[in-house]
Image (tube, rainbow, N blue to C red):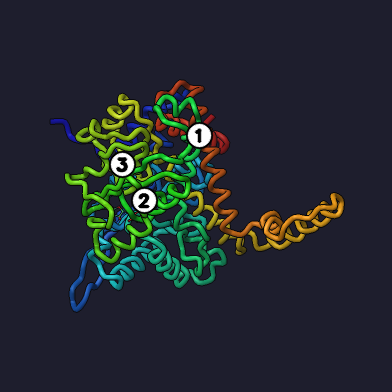
């Protein structure tokens, strides 16, 4: 039997498919495709008494065509070099698509965060950061980590604190990591940014009548039946925010199993329920879906895999009954499975576009850290003042006045969260349009290949501007 392709090989396969639509020189394509630097490390951590655990960890910088490099850090017992390389490569293409001026990177530590105490996790995180500093693999102008699977604000705070301890006089030090708590110079809206970006992207994708007609769907998110796999950072926020657009989350799949409710699940209550019961099974008003990974096979309009890679493979692709799949996770569909899904007429909105909301808002956070000022701080009151003046003049001229409520809606100056969300929405809309246009113009059959195409052309342009390639 043929050996199954690895995650990294799958990314390369997707790259090669898109590269065939360009006329770029082989050498340049090779340079864009390959990982520039791979740092594998092992270090000891005392886990109690005289016990020492040797930790395996990675940081991969896929592309230096723009600096710094950027990408999350994953904590999982399944972390391996191939996975980190694949995720780093995806980061490069993702950043290019959403015009975030970074090269791609990714980190990973081979541990189970669920089975490791916070004290040991902190030790491991701090030592990992020190290892990165030793090798110049972290810094606001070098390489900027962020959260990924198994990590969040807490880990980013430990990384920041370690960095600032060892690099005390760097004025831009706070920009060494993103996804930090707001109280440590993080940015409002980063935690939910990936999930929110998924919804903004979906909202744009379902707005084209001809595309929805082809799927037998109406335009707009309202009334769409959604299934989500993984109720973590990305999955929870995507599920929660999509309901604000009138969609219904009819099924959720987690590690312990899946549940279903045709009227729609209240995902906020579901998350609370899981936290206190350790499982989503038994959530009031829901039915359990039996069978391994059966949750993602539920018939629906939109499936959002938001857990891990390789969830839809050649083994279960023919059982997927969604009309649209939005890849909130990285690499949830293997290329062989994708062929089956595309033949079934399913629209696949690829990871390198749809989950780029996280890195987009990380970029805003990095800018905030480098400029040392909160977005909106300098102009909010001034905007309110001048808008108030404008209304005064108009009221005088028309001899009509507006209500207090109307006035406060009109004059409201933009706060940090307003600016972050509006910048994110604009980014997701523009990027989708560029992918859709490339798909049409180059007659590319699917959105993933079109997204890779857009990305490769932009990176090649950057190399061209450096005079490295003609
Ligand atoms: P997370 O750790 O917060 O959540 C992942 C969730 O998936 C967990 O609740 C876990 O129990 C669940 N899960 C794991 N295996 C599962 C399975 N087989 N079936 C159902 N549920 C399962 O991680 P996250 O940050 O939400 O990341 C999820 C995915 O999104 C990853 O692929 C990650 O690379 C990608 N991503 C994350 C970000 C980000 O900003 N955090 C940005 C872009 C992409």
Q: Which residue is mark 2?
A: 235
Separation (CA) of disc 2 from disc 3: 13 Å
Q: Residue at x 21, y 54 (%)?
A: 256
Separation (CA) of disc 2 from disc 1: 22 Å
Q: Residue at x 27, y 62 (%)?
A: 113
Looking at the picture, how far across and down is residue 40, in whole percent? 30, 54
Q: Which residue is mark 1?
A: 207
Q: Is residue 370 left or right of residue 339?
A: right
Q: Examine the rendering and report whether any part of residue 178 can be seen.
A: yes
- The answer to which of marks 2 and 1 sits earlier in the sequence is 1
Secondary structure under tag 2 reads: helix
Looking at the picture, how far across and down is residue 437, in whole percent? 52, 28
Q: Residue at x 35, y 32 (%)?
A: 323
Relative height, residue 181 to residue 429 (above, below): below
Q: Nearer the viewer, residue 423 or 206?
A: 206
In which quadrant of the rendered image does the N terminus lie?
Answer: top left
In which quadrant of the rendered image does the C terminus lie?
Answer: top right
- The answer to which of marks 2 and 3 sits earlier in the sequence is 2
Residues packed near mark 1 inside 10 Å, few (<14), some (14 to 19) or many (20 plus)? some
Relative height, residue 43 to residue 204 (above, below): below
Q: Which residue is mark 3?
A: 332
Dot in front, 2 or 1: 1
The CB of the residue at mark 3 lies under 8 Å from ligand 1: yes
Secondary structure under tag 3 reads: loop
Secondary structure under tag 1 reads: loop
Q: Is residue 362 left or right of residue 278?
A: right
């Amino acid at each position: 039997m043929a050996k199954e392709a690895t995650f990294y090989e799958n990314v390369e396969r997707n790259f090669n498919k898109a590269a065939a639509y360009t006329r770029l020189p082989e050498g340049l394509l090779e340079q864009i495709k390959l990982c520039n630097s791979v740092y594998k490390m092992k270090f000891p951590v005392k886990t109690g008494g005289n016990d020492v655990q040797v930790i395996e960890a990675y940081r991969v910088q896929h592309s230096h065509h723009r600096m710094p490099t950027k990408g999350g850090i994953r904590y999982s017992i399944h972390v391996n070099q191939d996975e980190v390389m694949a995720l780093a490569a995806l980061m490069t293409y993702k950043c290019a698509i959403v015009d975030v001026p970074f090269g791609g990177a990714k980190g990973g530590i081979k541990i189970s965060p669920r089975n490791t105490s916070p004290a040991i996790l902190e030790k491991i995180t701090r030592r990992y950061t020190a290892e990165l500093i030793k090798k110049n693999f972290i810094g606001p102008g070098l390489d900027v980590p962020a959260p990924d699977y198994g990590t969040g604000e807490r880990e980013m705070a430990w990384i920041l604190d370690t960095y600032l301890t060892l690099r005390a006089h760097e004025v831009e030090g706070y920009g060494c990591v993103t996804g930090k708590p707001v109280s440590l110079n993080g940015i409002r809206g980063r935690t939910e940014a990936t999930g929110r970006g998924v919804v903004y992207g979906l909202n744009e994708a379902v707005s084209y009548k001809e595309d929805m007609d082809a799927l037998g769907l109406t335009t707009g998110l309202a009334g769409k039946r959604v299934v989500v796999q993984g109720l973590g950072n990305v999955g929870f926020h995507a599920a929660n925010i999509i309901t604000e657009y009138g969609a219904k989350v009819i099924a959720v799949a987690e590690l312990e199993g899946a549940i279903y409710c045709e009227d729609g699940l209240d995902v906020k209550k579901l998350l609370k329920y899981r936290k206190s019961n350790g499982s989503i099974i038994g959530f009031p008003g829901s039915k359990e879906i039996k069978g391994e990974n059966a949750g993602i096979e539920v018939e629906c309009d939109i499936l959002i895999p938001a857990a891990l890679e390789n969830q839809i493979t050649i083994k279960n692709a023919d059982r997927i009954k969604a009309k649209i799949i939005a890849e909130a996770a990285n690499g949830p569909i293997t290329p062989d499975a994708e062929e089956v899904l595309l033949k079934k007429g399913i629209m696949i909105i690829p990871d390198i576009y749809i989950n780029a909301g996280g890195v987009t808002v990380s970029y805003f956070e990095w800018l905030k850290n480098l400029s040392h000022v909160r977005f909106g701080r300098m102009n909010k009151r001034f905007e309110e003042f001048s808008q108030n003046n404008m209304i005064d003049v108009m009221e005088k001229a028309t001899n009509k006045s507006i209500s207090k409520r109307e006035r406060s809606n009109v004059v409201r100056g933009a706060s940090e969260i307003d600016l972050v969300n509006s910048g994110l929405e604009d980014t997701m809309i523009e990027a989708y349009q560029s992918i859709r246009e490339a798909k049409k113009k180059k007659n590319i059959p699917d959105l993933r290949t079109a997204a890779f195409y857009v990305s490769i052309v932009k990176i090649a342009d950057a190399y061209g501007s450096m005079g490295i390639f003609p």
